[in-house]
Amino acid sequence: MFENVKVIYFISDVHLGSAGHSGSDREKLAKLSLLFGRMAGPGDRLFILGDLFDFWFEYRSVIQKEHLEIIRLLKDLRSRGVTVDLLVGNHDFWIGDFLSRELGITVHRQPLALEAGGKKMFLAHGDGLGKGDLGYKMLKVVLRNPFTIWLYRLLHPDLAIPFAKWFSQVSRNHLTRDMHLDPGPMLEVAREKFAQGFDCVLLGHTHLPTVHEENGKIYINLGDFIASFSYAVFRDGVLTLEYIK
C-alpha cells in the first residue's frame, strides 16, 4: 500500500545500448529526459518494468561506459526525491547492486503486487509468464543461476560484452517473430490476474502498446521506448497510456 504517492509512472523496454542502434540511444535518452522532467519530486514514483538496458553486467570494478548518461539522469531523478523501482527483464537480469548502492534504486527480480489509490496492481516484465515456451523458461533458470554468473564474470569485458550483444540480437529476433504480432498470450496472463483480484495489470516485453479494459479492470502493455515512446501514468486513481512526442 502506497501512502502519500502523487503520481506513478511506468516504462519498459528502452533497450539502451542495443547493437547497431547508437543513434537511437540519443533519441531514447532525450525523450527519457523529457519524461523525467515531468516528475515533480517527492511523492512521484517511477517503475521500470524491465529491459532498461539491452545488456547489463557488473564486474567488481567495471560497468559499461555507454550507460553513463542514463546513470546521470537517474541520479538527478533520485536527487529530486522521486522513488525509482526497477524490475529486471530478459535482457538486463544480470543487474547487480550498483544501481541500488549508488543511486538508491530498488531492484526487483520477481513480479510485484501492490496497492495504490484503492487499486490492486500486478507488475511484471512479462517474459516467461503464462503457458508454454518451456524451452525459454528452462534457459531463464540456467542464465540466472549464480554459478552461470560467476563463470561469465571470468570473461574479459571486451569479450563478454560483444558476445552478450550478439546474443541479445538473437533474442530480439525471436521476440519479433513470435510475439510482436500476437498480443493474445499477454492478454490471457492479464485475465488470469483479473481472476485473482487485480484491478490493473501492467506488462512489457512485447513492445506493443496495448490498452484492454473489461469488467472495470484494465490491462496495459507499456510498449517500448524505441519506436512508440509510450508509458503509463497512474494519477488520481486513473491509469492511462500516454506517449512522448
Image (cartoon, grey):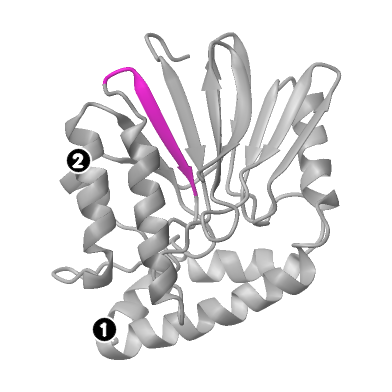
Residue 84 on the magenta segment: no
- Magenta-colored span: 42-49
Residue at 62% across / 23% down in the picture?
239
| Residue located 28% across and 55% down the image | 70
Crowding at dot 2, Cα within 10 Å, few <14 / some 14-19 / many 20+, comes out as some
Q: Nearer the viewer, mark 2 or mark 1?
A: 2
Residue 30: mark: none
Q: Which residue is nearer to you in this view: 208 or 38?
A: 38
Q: Earlier in the sequence, mark 2 or mark 1?
A: 2
- How far from the left and from the top, in percent, is residue 102? 16, 47
**Residue 221's x, y, as percent?**
67, 43
Based on the displayed image, in which of its 4 quarters is residue 59 positioned? Answer: bottom left
Residue at screen point 20% across, 51% down: 72
Q: Is residue 19 above or below residue 8?
A: below
In the image, taking residue 195 as reference, residue 147 lies left or right, namely left
Q: Secondary structure at mark 1?
A: helix
Closer to the camera, 201 or 44? 44
Report the side of 135 relative to 86 (left or right): right
User: Which residue type does callout 1 highlight?
Assistant: Pro
Q: Helix, strand or loop at disc 2?
A: helix
C-alpha span from label 2 to label 1: 28 Å
In the picture, the disc for residue 157 is 1
Please name the residue that numbered disc 2 is placed on. Answer: 76
Image-based side of 152 in relation to 72, left or right: right
Residue 31, given in percent of the width and then of the height, sits at: 41, 50
